[in-house]
């Protein structure tokens, strides 16, 4: 539907504008977009070029100069001494458990809240709506003491439980999706002897697959890019973000190594983006409108 | 006979029935989320409210009730008030960001080759790691980190045009604008995608009708596209205000809040963790929450009127 609209807008043409004006306008559009794209790309290209230079070459050459001989030693330094490899490992460990946990608890919560209408579920639903408004970073002022009291400081469980437990947006996406799955389906399964957990497991969960994909993308990118949770709660277990952040200190003068670290950190994001481009556009938008 | 049997159902039978199962499922399915909600959100929120009337440190030894003093400090001392002012830079920046995003989205929706490539390039920074973006912009703006000619990227570009280098991040008049620029660079892609979605949902029939009436490009935008996407524009502006009130990561990593760049949230975190004034930090958290609640209230009012 959206695609049809798009093509018909594209094929639309002005009737009364003279051709020369039209061409000038068209050229202007491309110039505008190319300038915008250059603004985005130049800082990134500098990083890539810098990461391939040796230390002295980087200091002495212009930022735009191509490396004489592309060097990969910076990448090795970043991977090993800069703990980027370790950071990637830790991040993926947290990612896997948190994403799995979010999907299981999120779908279960959404199933109960959307399907059963009783006082208890209504209260919980309202609380979730209000809680979604709380500013998450400011909340850390008091969350920190609770995590400490639980003895979870510097423990992977702290960020994992937080990622699972404070994700209201995912629950909202699941509930929205459940609105469009007919109730008669689970009722007929129930009448045929399927229990409610069975209905959830055999009918709801498989039908929620597109919503799960949406949540996975948002969640994965969100955790991968999250800096503050890891910085505050697991200061001695570096994630990608904190490893990069900690780079600034000891490698403050070695920008070429820092740049290599940045490139390594961006590559997974780039792969995800290029392979899921279309669904990312629609998923990120649908995820945020619910806020 | 059967009615009698129904009344004398055992507990086990009731649990297997419709209602019983419903309650049991609800209880067990919501157990973990509710426990996590209590630990990580509800209890901290209540604590935050209580602590905001106290003088206390990180360990919470001998907290002292001091009434509204924390709030008075917050609204009278320039150290804290100035962080509100810094948020205004981001608010202004986000208006520019919305206008630019709308312009780009409109351009991308017109007859154009490579529209998807442009869209992809402009969107990608939104997905990038915030720390990476911040470090990139530190280098983009910093002057003379190197010994001989390793200028910041921006100064190197300016030197091509013969403009002498400027120390962007050291100049208190420029530094906040630099941070705003970095923030627009990272977040504009999201707005572009939102606006493209809104523009594409306008029915093509309306364009054809306007075409028959001989509307020009500007008229098309002002009388068809803009009214069609007005709800999204309004929503985006509300999100922009909320975003400006809670700016954190880019200034925190690029300047650490130094040189007059501290935002309200950075100040909150510094107050609570660096200076260990948990009471004051909590009061700041409550103030931010109130600001967000007010904006959300206004947003709900506006959108209800539209409907």
Image (cartoon, helix red, strand yellow):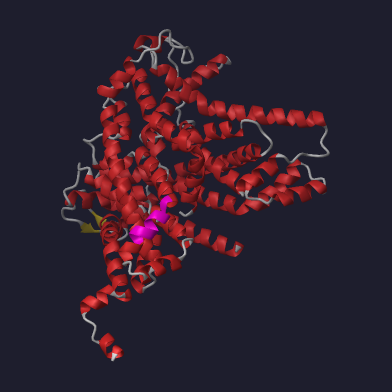
Q: In the image, is B132 to the left or to the right of B210? A: left
Q: Residue at x 25, y 57 (%)?
A: B39
Q: Is residue A39 above or below residue A214?
A: above
Q: Picture coordinates of residue A33 (x, y %)?
A: 61, 30
Q: Nearer the viewer, residue B137 or A289?
A: A289
Q: Residue at x 45, y 41 (%)?
A: B86
Q: Which residues are magenta?
A: A200-209
Does residue A131 show up?
A: no
Q: Nearer the viewer, residue A69 or A107?
A: A107
Please tell me whether residue A264 belongs to the stretch shown in magenta.
no
Does residue A260 show up?
A: yes
Q: In the image, is B232 to the left or to the right of A255? A: right
Q: Residue at x 28, y 85 (%)?
A: B6
Name the outermost residue toward the top: A68
Q: Is residue A128 above or below residue B219?
A: below
Q: Is residue B14 above or below residue B258?
A: below
Q: Nearer the viewer, residue B98 or A78?
A: A78
The quadrant the C terminus of chain B occupies is bottom right
Q: Is residue B8 above or below residue B52?
A: below
Q: Picture coordinates of residue B60 (x, y %)?
A: 19, 53
Q: Residue at x 54, y 49 (%)?
A: B236
Q: Nearer the viewer, residue A236 or A26?
A: A26
Q: Picture coordinates of residue A243 (x, y %)?
A: 29, 31
Dominant SS of magenta comes to helix
The quadrant the N terminus of chain B occupies is bottom left
Q: Picture coordinates of residue B256 (x, y %)?
A: 35, 34
Please tell me whether residue A206 belongs to the stretch shown in magenta.
yes
Q: Quadrant of residue A235?
A: top left
């Amino acid at each position: 539907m959206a695609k049809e609209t798009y093509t018909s807008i594209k094929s639309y043409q002005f009737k009364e504008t003279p051709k020369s004006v039209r061409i000038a306008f068209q050229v202007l559009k491309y110039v505008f977009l190319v300038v915008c794209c250059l603004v985005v790309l130049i800082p990134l290209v500098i990083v890539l070029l810098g990461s391939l230079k040796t230390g002295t070459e980087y200091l002495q050459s212009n930022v735009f100069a191509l490396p004489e001989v592309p060097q990969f030693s910076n990448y090795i330094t970043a991977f090993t001494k800069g703990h980027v490899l370790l950071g990637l490992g830790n991040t993926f460990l947290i990612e896997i458990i948190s994403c799995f946990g979010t999907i299981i608890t999120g779908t279960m919560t959404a199933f109960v809240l959307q399907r059963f209408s009783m006082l208890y579920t209504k209260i919980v639903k309202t609380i979730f709506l209000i809680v979604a408004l709380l500013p998450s970073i400011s909340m850390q002022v008091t969350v920190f003491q609770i995590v400490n009291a639980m003895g979870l400081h510097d423990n992977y469980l702290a960020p994992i439980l937080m990622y699972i437990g404070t994700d209201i947006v995912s629950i909202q996406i699941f509930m929205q999706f459940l609105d469009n799955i007919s109730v008669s389906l689970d009722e007929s399964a129930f009448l045929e002897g399927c229990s409610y957990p069975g209905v959830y497991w055999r009918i709801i969960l498989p039908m929620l697959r597109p919503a799960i994909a949406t949540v996975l993308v948002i969640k994965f990118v969100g955790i991968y890019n999250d800096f503050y949770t890891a910085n505050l709660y697991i200061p001695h277990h570096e994630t990608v973000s904190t490893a990069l952040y900690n780079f600034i200190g000891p490698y403050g003068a070695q920008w070429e190594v820092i740049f290599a670290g940045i490139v390594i950190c961006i590559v997974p994001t780039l792969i995800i983006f290029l392979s899921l481009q279309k669904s990312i556009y629609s998923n990120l938008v649908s995820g945020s409108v619910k806020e | 006979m059967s009615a009698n049997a129904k009344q004398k159902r055992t507990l086990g039978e009731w649990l297997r029935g419709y209602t019983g199962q419903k309650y049991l499922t609800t209880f067990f399915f919501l157990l973990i989320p509710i426990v996590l909600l209590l630990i990580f959100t509800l209890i901290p929120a209540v604590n935050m409210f209580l602590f905001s009337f106290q003088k206390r440190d990180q360990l919470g030894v001998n907290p002292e009730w001091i009434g509204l003093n924390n709030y008075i400090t917050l609204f009278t001392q320039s150290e804290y008030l100035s962080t509100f002012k810094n948020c205004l830079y981001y608010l202004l920046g986000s208006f520019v960001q919305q206008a630019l995003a709308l312009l780009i989205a409109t351009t991308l929706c017109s007859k154009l080759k490579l529209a998807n490539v442009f869209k992809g390039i402009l969107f990608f920074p939104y997905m990038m790691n915030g720390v990476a973006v911040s470090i990139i912009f530190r280098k983009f703006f910093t002057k003379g980190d190197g010994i001989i000619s390793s200028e910041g990227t921006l100064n190197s570009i300016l030197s091509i045009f013969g403009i002498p280098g400027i120390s962007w991040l050291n100049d208190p008049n420029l530094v906040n604008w630099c941070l705003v620029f970095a923030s627009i660079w990272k977040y504009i892609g999201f707005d572009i995608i939102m606006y493209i979605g809104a523009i594409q949902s306008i029915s093509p029939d309306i364009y054809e009708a306007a075409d028959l009436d001989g509307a020009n490009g500007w008229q098309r935008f002002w009388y068809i596209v803009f009214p069609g996407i007005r709800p999204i524009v309004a929503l985006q502006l509300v999100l922009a205000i909320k975003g400006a009130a809670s700016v954190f990561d880019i200034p925190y990593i690029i300047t650490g809040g130094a040189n007059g760049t501290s935002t309200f949230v950075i100040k909150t975190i510094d107050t609570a963790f660096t200076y260990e004034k948990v009471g004051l930090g909590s009061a700041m958290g409550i103030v931010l929450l109130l600001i967000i609640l007010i904006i959300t209230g206004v947003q709900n009012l506006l959108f209800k009127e539209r409907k």
